[in-house]
């Protein structure tokens, strides 16, 4: 049985309903299996007198054909009510277009349905911005968009029955106090989040079985679903290969993602199309190189230099051990105990990217020459006020941060606070704040 998890998106749906009062539709975007349909239906059940959910993956041709001709909205609404056995009431009901990319004309119809004003409309979609799903239709301006991500760390702790941990971490962060005796337990709990991830199916499986091997099988089924989706966009399988290569690319500690290592030579326009498809799918978090670190980092974003992280770190861990039929529990237990004898820096970078992206940040990094053969690299940069916050990530207890120091020397007037995220307790080192990785969510 699937649990219904508490999600922060619910409050955002409520804000939209209260503020817009039917003047716009709401499109909930996100990768497949992040829980879009579940949370939207829960919202409809509790916040409206009645609702109709049209799943365009399952809807028959007769339902889809309703949106070919919008001249008689009364007929459309009567047909929907008859087919779904639901009475709709003006301003008290909502119609949900689930997986709306499967019926582009329904999305185009939003303009007229919203103008009609009788009901509210919520859409959900995956790979929604891919050209093949929108060509030939007019994207409605009467459509607000919101992105749903995998469960963040606080939502994960809620699922574990723990409402205290994240507010406590926030207090220690704000007061700049070490966790002390509680630190080891809190880091182990966070590593569990890294292993299970935030996909509701995986979290549900963990709660029922407490078996990380079974959780891994669930994650593999989600990854295969993503592979199938990418094949529908590019049947040569090259997008799938790019996605599957993410852990390997990051483990090489390269200053950029090198797509040709995964798919060979490809035309530049085609490569940009592949990368855009991955980005639009919401299955990855893109981190672009900023050529001139300053408050307006988008102005000097380099579209040709980027790193790619998976949107869910639990899926990342499974991808990293994809060469096995399943990721043995012994590997998971060693990861959980922080005893696996490999450099896991890239796993921690992935979870930091996830925490920062989920909090609404655009992600950038920066490299500059150290000598003829080596570079300094700042893993992430955030724009805060009129300053830049540089971040270095380490998977160890080492407190050295040469790249961070060099960056802060080079751009002293632009730097606000500076952070080292690592696997030990909160501390400080001259001007640098040393934070345990989970506190990245508060930056």
Image (tube, rainbow, N blue to C red):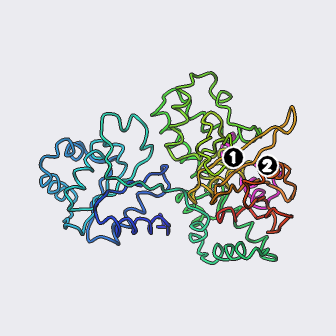
> Label 1, on which residue?
293
Q: Residues within 10 Å of mark 2 (few under 14, many from 20)?
A: many
Residue 440, position in %: x, y?
68, 61
Instruction: Report whether 113 appears left or right of 315.
Output: left
Residue at 64 percent across and 57 percent down: it is 386
Q: Which residues are magenta?
A: 320-345
Q: Does residue 114 sit above or below 45 in this rendering?
A: above
Q: Is residue 286 magenta?
A: no
> Label 2, on which residue?
407
Q: Does residue 47 sit above or below 393 in this rendering?
A: below
Instruction: Report whether 92 appears left or right of 392.
Output: left
Residue at 14 percent across and 57 percent down: it is 78
Q: Residues within 10 Å of mark 1 (few under 14, many from 20)?
A: many
Residue at 78 percent across and 75 percent down: it is 179
Residue closest to the eye, 91 or 377: 377
Magenta highlight: main SS: loop
Q: Is residue 339 magenta?
A: yes
State the separation of the CA atoms marked 2 and 1.
10 Å
Task: Identify the disc placed on residue 8.
Answer: none
Residue 253, position in %: x, y?
77, 40
Could you tell me which quadrant the C terminus lies in?
Answer: bottom right
Residue closest to the eye, 298 or 255: 298
Residue 352, position in %: x, y?
68, 55
Dot 2 and dot 1 residues touching (CB under 8 Å): yes
Q: Secondary structure at mark 2?
A: helix
Q: Does residue 314 sit above or below 438 in this rendering?
A: above
Q: Secondary structure at mark 1?
A: loop
Which quadrant would residue 439 be assigned to in this image?
bottom right
- Mark nearer the N terminus (2 vs 1): 1
């Amino acid at each position: 049985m699937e649990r219904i998890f508490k999600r922060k998106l619910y409050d955002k749906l409520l804000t939209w309903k209260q503020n817009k009062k039917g003047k716009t539709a709401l499109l909930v975007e996100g990768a497949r299996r992040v829980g879009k349909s579940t949370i939207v239906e829960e919202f409809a059940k509790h916040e409206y007198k009645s609702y109709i959910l049209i799943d365009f993956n399952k809807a028959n041709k007769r339902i889809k054909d309703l949106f070919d001709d919008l001249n008689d909205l009364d007929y459309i609404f009567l047909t929907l009510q008859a087919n779904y056995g639901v009475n709709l009431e003006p301003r008290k009901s909502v119609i949900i277009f689930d997986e709306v990319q499967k019926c582009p004309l329904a999305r185009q119809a939003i303009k007229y349905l919203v103008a009609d004003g009788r009901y509210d409309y919520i859409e959900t979609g995956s790979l929604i911005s891919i050209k093949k799903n929108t060509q030939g239709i007019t994207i409605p301006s009467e459509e607000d968009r919101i992105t749903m991500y995998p469960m963040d760390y606080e939502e994960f702790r809620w699922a574990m029955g723990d409402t205290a941990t994240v507010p406590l971490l926030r207090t220690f962060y704000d007061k700049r106090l070490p966790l002390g005796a509680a630190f080891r337990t809190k880091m182990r709990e966070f590593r569990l989040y890294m292993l299970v991830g935030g996909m509701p199916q995986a979290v549900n499986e963990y709660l029922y079985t407490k078996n990380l091997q079974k959780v891994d099988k669930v994650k593999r089924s989600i990854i295969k679903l993503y592979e199938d989706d990418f094949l529908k966009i590019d049947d040569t399988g090259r997008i799938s290969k790019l996605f599957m290569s993410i852990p390997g690319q990051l483990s090489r500690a390269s200053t950029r993602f090198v797509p040709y290592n995964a798919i060979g030579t490809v035309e530049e326009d085609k490569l940009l199309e592949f990368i855009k498809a991955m980005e639009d799918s919401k299955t990855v978090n893109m981190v672009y190189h900023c050529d001139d670190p300053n408050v307006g980092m988008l102005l000097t974003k380099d579209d040709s230099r980027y790193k790619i992280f998976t949107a869910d770190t639990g899926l990342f861990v499974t991808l990293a051990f994809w060469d096995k039929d399943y990721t043995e529990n012994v590997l998971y237990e060693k990861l959980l105990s922080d005893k696996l004898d490999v450099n896991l820096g890239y796993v921690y970078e992935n979870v930091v990217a996830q925490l920062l992206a989920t909090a609404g940040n655009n992600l950038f990094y920066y490299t500059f020459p150290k000598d003829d053969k080596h570079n300094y690299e700042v893993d992430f940069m955030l724009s805060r006020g009129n300053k830049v916050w540089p971040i270095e990530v380490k998977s160890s207890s080492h407190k050295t941060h040469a790249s961070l120091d060099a960056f802060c020397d080079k751009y002293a007037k632009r730097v606000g606070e500076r952070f080292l995220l690592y696997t030990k307790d909160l501390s400080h080192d001259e001007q640098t704040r040393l934070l345990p990785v989970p506190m990245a969510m508060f930056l």
